[in-house]
Image (spheres, rainbow, N blue to C red):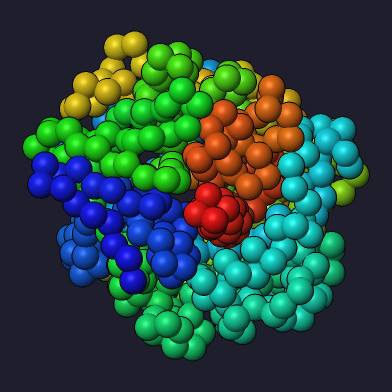
């Protein structure tokens, strides 16, 4: 076991320096520490305990709970703000025709945003990685599905993914190994919904989930608390903190409240050091052989732009001028209605089934694909809000809440964006964080590809509503963010129009890797986390090979 070496002034030396402790950075740290490399992880935010987050959630006001405030229960470091919306803190300023649809809710906390995720662990389809070749839109990946597939398998093992092993229930079915655990059992609502919609081509299938259906590497079996967002109270759901702790047991170091702001490069444009501010605003330096920036799809390009130096005046890794460009998220909307029979969602995890029929097809040459998740979050909160507005009291109020909770349906629809250079993160000229570092500005326009895809989804939803004899049928007007941030350090084979190669290594710097959602050149319609983890594992292998060559 090899550990990083600290100096008396607080500086540190390690073989591998990783900025960010979310699922990507933590998993890479665990992999590399297991191979005997010294690893230091630098995290801008605080280190928290699960019990603290659970108690904070229990004590949140009703308005925050029903408003899906998944940020507010996580305390923020004084020097490292993240976006807040109850009330807004304006850390990220949004503009453009669809700026409001890019209102991301990520954490700057040891363990990352998977503290409050839905634990959906989808793979891209092979066609998702060939968008330009197959449909004439967007970009192709620099690697194929077959090249990434072994890393999908490894990521599923690392995260303890529960999924269906019947190929007819998989999306995609191109797999070389079974899921580590059998799928999370469906509740009545998932079963009944699938019975109604599947004969009409919508194809409701189980969501592969980072949840334990049997004890798994210290995690207990999921008992259906239905509290996955914002916090799994028992730790049955995978969180990045699990890999942080595994890496520490192998000798890796973790520094919380370490805000990286500068990156040094030598005459060959190799990274030589990163500098960070501690909680007292004192500067320190981490030197190493290999460097990883795995903050998230916003903080990574922000840091690269902040760290511009003499040799890289437009920002680190930015000779292509693509850092911060091609920002993507699965902008989406909700469809709610009361069915003509009880559905009783709210038993089990927050999400268990998804309609993937519109996920792929020739139509993608013209407009966005979509997926439709049957939200399994209990409907008691919104049912209470709606019932109170009717002026009911006493038993009448209780009966109406029960009726609405039983018959209520909430579908969450995600749409597939294309990478567009004008959808861009830049540094604010006026707003600064507590350390005086420029805050991020983001311009976002989903484009006609997504808008036309939304029209197609609306028609599909109206049909689904008819299948259930829906009343109080409503489709939300505005697009919402899904916190699946992609594209800001985009992957490509051509260094002139991309930031990293197929191993997520920066084109401009031989010893810098930028894995995660920011590297993804196509969005698909599915949650990004498993693909991010797979890319992180592939990058870790590339780092290990590089260090071995250099040591030989």
Residue 378 picture location, percent across and down: 44, 67
Q: Position of residue 45 (x, y in %)?
A: 25, 46
Residue positioned 50% across, 26% down in the render = 268
Give coordinates of residue 273: x percent, y percent: 34, 36
Q: Residue furthest front?
A: 552
Q: Give coordinates of residue 535: x percent, y percent.
A: 59, 53
The residue at the point 48 percent across, 80 percent down is 212
Image quadrant holding the C terminus, namely: bottom right
Quarter assignment of residue 306: top left
Give the left or right position of residue 291, taking residue 539 as reference: left
With 427 as the anchor, is 254 left or right in this view? left
Q: How many marks?
A: 0
Q: Is residue 404 above or below residue 162?
A: above
Q: Is residue 255 left or right of residue 483?
A: left
Q: Residue at 21% across / 59% down in the picture?
A: 48
Quarter containing the N terminus: bottom left
Give above or below for 148 relative to 83: below
């Amino acid at each position: 076991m090899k550990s990083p070496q600290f100096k008396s002034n607080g500086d540190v030396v390690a073989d591998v320096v990783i900025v960010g402790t979310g699922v990507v950075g933590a998993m890479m740290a665990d992999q590399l520490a297991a191979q005997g490399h010294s690893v230091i992880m630098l995290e801008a935010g605080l280190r928290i305990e699960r019990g603290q987050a659970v108690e904070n959630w229990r004590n949140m006001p009703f308005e925050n709970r029903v408003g899906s405030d998944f940020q507010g229960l996580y305390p923020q470091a004084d020097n490292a703000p993240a976006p807040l919306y109850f009330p807004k803190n304006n850390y990220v300023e949004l503009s453009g025709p669809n700026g409001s649809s890019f209102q991301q809710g990520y954490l700057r906390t040891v363990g990352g945003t998977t503290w409050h995720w839905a634990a959906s662990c989808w793979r891209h389809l092979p066609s998702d990685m060939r968008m330009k070749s197959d449909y004439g839109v967007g970009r192709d990946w620099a690697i194929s599905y077959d090249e990434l597939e072994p890393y999908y398998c490894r990521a599923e093992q690392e995260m303890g993914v529960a999924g269906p092993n019947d190929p007819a229930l998989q999306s995609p079915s191109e797999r070389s190994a079974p899921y580590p655990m059998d799928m999370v059992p469906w509740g009545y609502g998932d079963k009944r919904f699938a019975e109604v919609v599947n004969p009409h081509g919508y194809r409701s299938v189980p969501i592969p989930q980072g949840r334990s259906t049997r004890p798994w590497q210290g995690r207990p079996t999921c008992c259906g608390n239905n509290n996955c967002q914002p916090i799994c109270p028992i730790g049955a759901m995978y969180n990045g903190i699990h890999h942080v702790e595994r890496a520490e047991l192998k000798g890796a170091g973790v520094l919380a409240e370490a805000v990286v702001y500068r990156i040094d490069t030598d005459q060959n444009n190799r990274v030589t050091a990163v500098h960070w501010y501690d909680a007292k605003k004192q500067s320190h330096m981490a030197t190493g052989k290999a460097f990883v920036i795995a903050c998230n799809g916003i903080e990574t390009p922000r840091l690269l732009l902040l760290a511009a130096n003499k040799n890289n005046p437009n920002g680190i890794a930015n000779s292509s001028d693509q850092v911060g460009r091609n920002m993507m998220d699965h902008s989406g909307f909700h469809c709610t209605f009361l069915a003509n029979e009880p559905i009783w969602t709210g038993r089990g995890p927050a999400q268990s089934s998804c309609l993937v029929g519109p996920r792929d097809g020739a139509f993608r040459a013209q407009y966005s694909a979509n997926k439709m998740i049957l939200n399994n979050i209990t409907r008691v909160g919104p049912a209470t809000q709606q019932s109170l507005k009717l002026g009911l009291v006493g038993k009448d109020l209780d009966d109406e809440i029960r009726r609405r909770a039983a018959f209520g349906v909430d579908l969450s629809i995600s749409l597939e964006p294309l990478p567009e250079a004008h959808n861009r993160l830049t540094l604010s000229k006026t707003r600064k964080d507590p350390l005086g570092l420029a805050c991020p500005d983001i311009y976002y326009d989903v484009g006609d590809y997504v808008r036309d895809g939304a029209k197609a989804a609306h028609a599909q939803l109206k049909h689904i509503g008819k299948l259930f004899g829906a009343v109080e049928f409503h489709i939300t007007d505005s697009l919402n963010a899904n916190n699946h941030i992609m594209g800001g350090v985009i992957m490509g084979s051509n260094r002139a129009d991309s930031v990293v190669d197929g191993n997520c290594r920066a084109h401009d710097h031989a010893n810098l890797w930028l894995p995660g959602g920011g590297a993804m050149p196509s969005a698909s319609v599915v949650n990004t986390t498993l693909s991010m983890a797979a890319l992180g594992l592939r990058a870790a292998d590339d780092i290990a090979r590089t260090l071995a060559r250099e040591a030989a």
